[in-house]
Amino acid sequence: MRISDHVDITIQIFGKSHEDVHEWLDATFPKWINSNQSPFNHWLARHHVQAINEQYSDKEQRAVAYLHVICDIASRWGEYFLPSNEKALSNYLIGKGIMIV
């Protein structure tokens, strides 16, 4: 999903954009989109509970970040999943046939 899509959803649910949270989650995307690797690799560093909890102590920011991850996965595979850590996400992506590094 695009950051603008995440922001629209966040405004509807939380009443503000939290664009900074979405930008942090997707900050590594440009590195992967311009490589020969899967762009889903950008999820590995930040699209899981462990990374989000290390970055944010504020409950609302965490909730926004969790929703971002859930929406990314749901929009791609129609499943609602929030990985606990990088290994859980890696296993999930491998199960979907996504080649990761």
Image: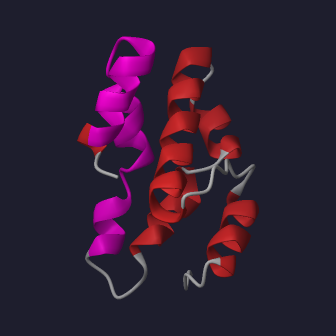
Direction from residue 75 to residue 20 in the image, left or right = left
Does the magenta segment cover residue 65? no
Pinpoint residue 66: horizontal percent, then vertical percent: 58, 36
Seen from this angle, which residue lies furthest top? 15
Pinpoint residue 81: horizontal percent, then vertical percent: 67, 51
Quarter holding residue 18: top left
Q: Is residue 92 above or below residue 12?
A: below
Does the magenta segment cover residue 12? yes
Seen from this angle, which residue lies furthest front? 78
Residue located at (70% from left, 44% from top): 50
Quarter holding residue 95: bottom right
Residue located at (62% from left, 17% from top): 59
Direction from residue 52 to residue 30 in the image, left or right = left
Q: Is residue 37 above or below residue 90?
A: below
Q: Is residue 15 above or below residue 8?
A: above
Pinpoint residue 80: horizontal percent, then vertical percent: 63, 49
Front position in the image: 8 or 26: 8
Front position in the image: 49 or 12: 12
Direction from residue 39 to residue 62 in the image, left or right = right
Q: Which residues are magenta?
A: 5-33
Quarter holding residue 42: bottom left
Quadrant of the frame with the C terminus: bottom right
